[in-house]
Image (cartoon, grey):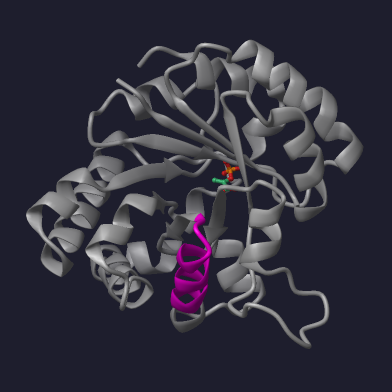
Amino acid sequence: MKKIIIGNFKMNTKPSELKPYAMSLATKTKGSKNDIIICPPYTHLSVAREFLTGSGVAYGAQNISDEEKGALTGEISASMIKDLGATYVIIGHSERRAKFKETDRLVNRKIKTALANGLKVILCVGESLQIRENRQAYAFIKKELDDDLKGIYENELDSVIIAYEPIWAIGTGKTATNKDIIKMIETIRKEVEYLYSEKAGKELSVVYGGSVNLNNYKKILSNETVNGVLVGGACLDVDAFAVMCRENY
Ligand code: PEP
């Protein structure tokens, strides 16, 4: 079964490092049935365009402004990344929510801007350890989905991938158990079913992220309800990432 394999470089690597990475990934994953997406920093996108166009690897950005253009020093718009051939954008990553104080309202605006510009959205949702320990994880994720997807039409969900990323699992080496991942992904499907329709919940693309690596990716992806993985640290090693990308699931 086809899976979605996403690599998030975060603020690692230099633009000059992307050429060998991209060429190697494109070669090693040639013929793979999976959807392969990398999200390097903005500064790498023109390199991605040069070396990934026509390959089986798509690319996107890790963030965009909620505004289209204007006096917003330092911001990058959806149309700018689209102009560089990006087809995806990560929105609402927990690092942006925590460190840059991004609210659900802002995340919602960014999703609308991305979709209006023809980009596909990788929307990250996930609970903190405290929320999980207080047994509020399910209610928290439902509320995040309600707020983040407000005003998004059902026919636009084809362009949205939900990434369930428990914050306590990101970069910590601790993954959620398969049972927890499946239970939360089913909760996400049910909430989308409640917000839209049974079909929308069933057809929604939902991936898991949080310390996915070569030792655990197969087990995580073994369940049908898990449509893919979002890989941070482990995607920086192109050989390891290529193994996950070319697997026949
Ligand atoms: C991430 O960047 O969203 C992520 C899940 O990182 P890591 O795989 O390093 O936990």
Left or right: residue 61 compared with residue 156: right
Q: Position of residue 35 (x, y in %)?
A: 46, 30
Residue at 51% across / 11% down in the picture?
31
- Position of residue 182 measured from the top left corner of the image (x, y, whole percent): 24, 41
57 lies above or below 98: above
Q: Per the image, is 112 magenta?
A: yes
Q: Is residue 202 visible?
A: yes
The part of the image, by quadrant, that contains residue 101 is bottom right
Residue 161 in sight here? no
Residue 185, compared with residue 221, is above or below; it is below
Q: Which of the 4 image quarters holds residue 129?
A: bottom left
Task: Locate the N terminus by quadrant.
Answer: top left
Give the residue drawn at x 42%, y 68%: 130
Tell me where the magenta segment starts and ends, as one range: 107-119
Question: Does 114 sit left or right of 9 as displayed?
Answer: left
Residue 65: give x, y in percent of width and height: 64, 73
Tell whether 92 sits left or right of 198: right
Residue 25 falls within the magenta-colored stretch: no
Quadrant in the rendering for residue 21: top right
For this rendering, which residue is in front, 53 or 59? 53
Residue drawn at (17%, 52%) of the image? 201
Instruction: Relative to 68, say whether 169 is above or below.
Output: above
Examine the residues drawn in magenta and state their main secondary structure: helix
